[in-house]
Amino acid sequence: MASLRDIQTRINSTKKTKQITKAMEMVSAAKLNQAENNAKSFVTYMDKIQEVVSSIASGSTNSRHPMLQKRSVKKTGYLVITSDRGLAGPYNSNVLRHVYRTIQERHNSKDEYTVIVVGKVGLNFFKNRNMPVEDSIVGLADQPEFADIKAIASQAVQKFTDEVYDELYMYYNHFVSAIQQDLTEKKLLPLTDISGEKEATSTYEYEPSEEEILEGLLPQYAESLIYGALLDAKASEHASRMTAMKSATDNAEEIIGSLTLSYNRARQAAITQEITEIVGGAAALE
Amino acid sequence: MKTFTVSVVTPDGPVYEETGAEMVSAKATSGELGILPGHVPLVAPLEINAIRVEKDNNTQILAVSGGFIEVRPEQVTILAQAAEMASDIDVDRAKAAKERAEKRLQGTKQDDIDFKRAELALNRAMNRINIKSR
């Protein structure tokens, strides 16, 4: 049986761990709140831009914009959103495992795909497996602003236009609720299902012309889709970390409970032994 | 007098929202636009420039970095990737951005993609500085 002092040390260290996980849980809860607000304020922008894009796209069926055109696929791009730090439960491994499996299934050689990755965990994952990483962004703020990701978003779109890859998929955890995040796969480019989502509410005049508007609007639209996914993923990350830290705190409590029990047992055993010794000693004197 | 609602939204949230505006003027790629209430529905891409909103004989000025204007008879929406009210502009930051862009412009060739990007960055910085100093 472990000595009293050993048990006491373990209880203390577990208590300290619990303090930390508890603090992390609360920090994540606060960040989650903020992330949800960010996502909400982004919705107005997204709704508007979607409305304009779909009304243009449904109005002109013969638009020949390259971002709307399907072309034969020689190379596929994968945009994967992960976090910079771990301690978020299955948040990263979910996405990475799925992407890895998908890539293995779909492609035979490394020339057929390329990966754009957000977050340190993902970057290390793909580098360790010697997979081609086209572009990456790490050290993103917890509440990213559009300016922070504009560079990678516009490059991702630009590379499609430059035919570096012929389609682009996006993988991230979609935020459903604080306890549920769903892995999401989304085909970002070419923009094929653009008009189907919402009925156009009004017909516009275009100045100077539809084509020229699409020229500027579509990249902006695709970039905002990426930003939207990122906000969504950030909310999931905080939620996932919060849940992970909550269960860590609960586990710590459980361990402290059982350690306290065995501490008390050991203490009682020691007392009993002491009494027996005293009694034994007294009996020997008589 | 007829009025309309003007809102400016960016990915980071709405920047400006005002009801009862009497006129909006903006610079589209095809030229200066002055929009009064009751305008036909219109969509136009914008230059990096100022937006002026007239309300009760006051003029409010915003800096927008490109984007689009969506016009409806009772509502004008400006969708931009970045926009701020004249009073919210950080001049020091804009000046720093201007210097950075100028430096980059000297270092790169004209047909380079970095050149175009630096040029745009310079435009944005100049726009902010101009609006602030007006």
Image: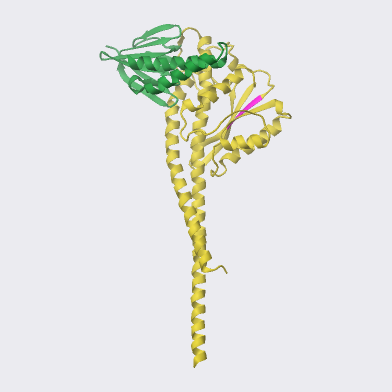
Chain colours: A yellow, B green
Query: Is residue B65 visible in this depiction of the protein?
Result: no
Q: Where is residue B11 drawn, in percent x and y?
A: 45, 25
Q: Where is residue B113 drawn, in percent x and y?
A: 56, 15
Q: Identify whether A260 is placed above or below A126.
A: below
Q: Residue furthest bottom?
A: A286
Q: What residue range appears in magenta?
A: A76-80
Q: Identify whether A222 is placed above or below A246.
A: above
Quarter of the image holding residue A157? top right
Q: Residue furthest right?
A: A108
**What residue is at 67 percent from the left and 32 percent from the top?**
A131
Q: Main secondary structure of the magenta part?
A: strand
**Residue A55 in magenta?**
no
Q: Identify whether A264 is placed above or below A278.
A: above
Q: Is residue B90 left or right of residue A263?
A: left
Query: Is residue A53 visible in this depiction of the protein?
Result: yes
Number of marks drawn: 0
Please state which of residues B28 and A283 is positioned toward the viewer in this rendering. Answer: A283
**What residue is at 40 percent from the left and 13 percent from the top?**
B49
Q: Is residue A271 left or right of residue A112?
A: left
**What residue is at 48 percent from the left and 17 percent from the top?**
B101
Q: Identify whether B20 is placed above or below A247.
A: above
Quarter of the figure with the N terminus of chain A: bottom right
Q: Where is residue A189 drawn, in percent x and y?
A: 59, 22
Quarter of the image holding residue B82? top left
Q: Where is residue A57 drawn, in percent x and y?
A: 53, 15
